[in-house]
Amino acid sequence: MTQALVQIREFLSKKTVGIAGAGGLGSNCAVALARTGVGRLIIADFDVLEPSNLNRQYYFRQQLGIPKVLALKENIRRIDPFIQVDAFTVKLNPDTITQLYKDCDVLIEAFDKAEMKQMLIETALSHWPDRPLIAASGLAGWGKTEDITIKRFGNFVLAGDDISETHEWNPPLGPRVSILAGMQANLALEFLLNGFQFKKSKIFKLQ
């Protein structure tokens, strides 16, 4: 591992990211952050893994029927056993959101349903107006990659095309979901690494 990667991982090991939802966005985003070295992930979701989830979510067929957060915790453990994953099998509401995510440096919204997205965003902004919040909207279908953008409202960032609504004939598919999950993870790193500087060692040559 290069000196740069060691320093980045050491810095991120002291950071905590909350992820609300463990589906296509949440599972892929969590894995990306785990691979980068974020020290603690707080993940909540009440769903169990179904066959239809495997087209876009970071799980395996052997995990069908298992609560998503527990399966995701195991997958992250296999990537890096030193990352702390706090997994909660719970349906989030304003009370549980403020309880579970109170210690996060960054909070990521990763729900499927619009009403859950709105509830999470409103709750987070009202309780933690200065905390970075990263949400996604408009991720269904395929193609239209150039339509995927980010909108910034202070520390609240929204990624997506904001129009590609999920329905029976426009399902979420792996490539587009993964792009947005990667964008959310990358935006989280932007906030987490704000102020980070490499410590470059000096090498002196004997004359």
Image: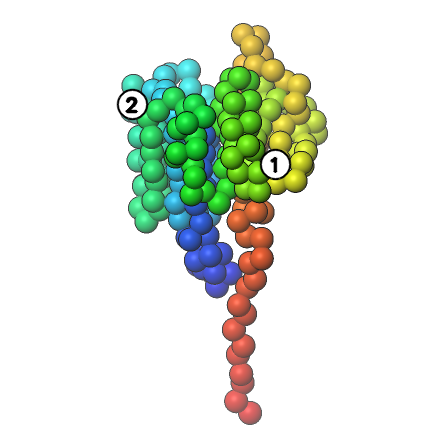
Residue 87 shown left or right of residue 150 in the figure: left
Which disc number belongs to residue 156?
A: 1
Residue 82, image x and y in percent? 32, 49
Q: Is residue 192 visible?
A: yes
Q: Quadrant of the N terminus?
A: bottom left
Q: Is residue 42 above or below residue 140?
A: below
Tell me which amino acid carries mark 1.
Phe
Name the image quarter holding residue 152.
top right
Tell me which amino acid carries mark 2.
Ile
At horizontal 30% and vertical 35% (from top left) the residue drawn is: 74
Residue 24 shown left or right of residue 134 in the figure: left
Query: What distance separates the C-alpha of mark 2 from that of mark 1?
Result: 32 Å
Q: Is residue 142 visible?
A: no
Q: Nearer the viewer, residue 171 or 14?
A: 14
Q: Nearer the viewer, residue 101 or 178?
A: 101
Q: Nearer the viewer, mark 2 or mark 1?
A: 1
At horizontal 58% and vertical 57% (from top left) the residue drawn is: 195
Secondary-structure class at tag 2: loop
At horizontal 53% and vertical 83% (from top left) the residue drawn is: 204
Residue 76, image x and y in percent? 36, 39
Residue 16, image x and y in percent? 43, 45
Q: Mark 2 or mark 1: name the one nearer the start of the chain.
A: 2
Which disc number belongs to residue 66?
A: 2
Q: Nearer the viewer, residue 26 or 104?
A: 104
